[in-house]
Amino acid sequence: MDTISSVNTLSTGQMKLISRGSYGPTLPGTWELTIDPHADYIIREAIFKTDSLKRTILIVNTSGIISKDDIKLAKNGFFHSVGTHYEADIEVIDITKVIASNPLYEEVVSRVTSPLPRGAQIADCRGKETILTTVE
């Protein structure tokens, strides 16, 4: 998120925030966030609209609260990528404070930071048309 253009209080007591920003480092657009100040300012809805496609490409909704060790998170979440039709329902079952090494975390980080596999496709949505590149 970059520059906040407006913040309004809704009749529900939640706040609606609109801001310039991006989805990833190269896809500029506008974020519309619904924030719940009565639930530790957890974001209850996030909508991202791109500048180049001039439409919503991402919707995230959350509900409930789970807390432990002074950490508060949304208990449930729903992620919907409009262009790809990818959806995910997420439920936080427990929060664990990790002090020692964490093999699962290290495995996830290695997957995120490693080079893309051969045949993977990269979608560049910055222009008027999406450009697909296949990793060789």
Image (cartoon, rainbow, N blue to C red):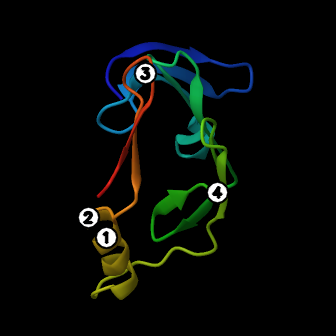
- Horizontally, residue 67 falls left or right of residue 10, namely left
From this viewpoint, which residue is outermost toward the right? 12
The local secondary structure at tag 3 comes to strand
Q: Earlier in the sequence, mark 3 or mark 1?
A: 3
Q: Residue shown at 45%/22% (left/top)? A: 129
- Horizontally, residue 108 falls left or right of residue 60, namely left
Q: Give the label on residue 65, or none.
A: 4
Instruction: Tell me how far mark 3 sits from mark 1, CA to CA.
Output: 27 Å
Residue 9: x percent and y percent? Answer: 61, 18
The local secondary structure at tag 2 comes to helix
Q: Give the label on residue 113, or none.
A: 2
Q: Amino acid at mark 1?
A: Val
Q: Amino acid at mark 3?
A: Gly
Density class for disc 2 (Cα within 10 Å; few <14, some 14-19, many ≥20) is few
Q: Are marks 2 and 1 in contact (CB under 8 Å)?
A: yes
Image quadrant in which you'd find residue 100: bottom left
Density class for disc 1 (Cα within 10 Å; few <14, some 14-19, many ≥20) is few
Rendered view: 97 above or below 70: below
Q: Residue shown at 40%/57% (left/top)? A: 120
Rendered view: 53 above or below 69: above
Q: Residue shown at 70%/54% (left/top)? A: 64
Q: Give the label on residue 109, or none.
A: 1
Q: Earlier in the sequence, mark 3 or mark 2?
A: 3
